[in-house]
Image (cartoon, helix red, strand yellow):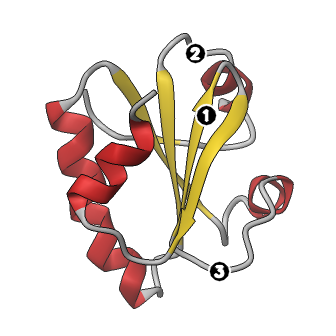
């Protein structure tokens, strides 16, 4: 499954997903975000049991604000529409996968 671009318009659908959701809050100008991005893409390709999305904080400031994103990259894990895990900064693939586990 590929990474979904998350916007205010499709967020409600994402929030209601039965799958565990991984959100990557990023900006195009952010160096650390560019380091995390390929890892997030890999996780999306290898783990179809998760819904993986990216939120551009410059394009979607309201979503970033709703999640209290102060620094990027920020990774957020949602289950049943609720935040169950959150991390700021560059993370290794294993660390991100651990965030997704029940």
Q: Would you identify the image quadrant in which residue 68 lies? A: bottom right
Distance in Å between CA atoms under marks 2 and 3 = 26 Å
User: Residue 69, image x and y in percent?
Assistant: 73, 68
User: Residue 17 bears which disc, if any?
Assistant: 2
Distance in Å between CA atoms under marks 1 and 3 = 19 Å
Looking at the rendered image, the quarter that the N terminus falls into is top left
Q: Nearer the viewer, residue 64 or 99?
A: 99
Look at the picture and state if 65 lies above or below 6. below
Look at the picture and state if 18 lies above or below 22. above
Q: Residue at x 32, y 58 (%)?
A: 95
Q: Residue at x 27, y 34 (%)?
A: 2
Secondary structure beneath label 3: loop
Secondary structure beneath label 2: loop
Look at the picture and state if 100 lies above or below 63. above
Secondary structure beneath label 1: strand
For label 3, count other residues whose C-alpha is less than 10 Å away and answer few (under 14), some (14-19) or many (20+): few
User: Residue 39, image x and y in percent?
Assistant: 23, 59
Q: Earlier in the sequence, mark 1 or mark 3?
A: 3
User: Residue 32 bears which disc, if any?
Assistant: none
Q: Answer left or right for 91 relative to 54.
A: left
Q: Which residue is mark 1?
A: 78
Determine contact: label 2, label 1, CB under 8 Å. yes
Q: Which residue is mark 3?
A: 71
User: Residue 67, image x and y in percent?
Assistant: 77, 54
């Amino acid at each position: 499954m590929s990474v979904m671009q998350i916007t205010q318009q499709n967020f409600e659908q994402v929030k209601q997903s039965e799958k565990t959701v991984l959100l990557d809050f990023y900006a195009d100008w952010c160096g650390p975000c560019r380091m995390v991005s390929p890892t997030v893409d890999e996780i999306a390709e290898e783990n179809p049991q998760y819904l993986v999305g990216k939120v551009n904080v410059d394009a979607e400031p309201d979503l970033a604000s709703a999640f209290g994103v102060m620094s990027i990259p920020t990774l957020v894990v949602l289950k049943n529409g609720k935040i169950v895990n959150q991390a700021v900064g560059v993370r290794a693939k294993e660390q991100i996968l651990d965030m997704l586990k029940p």
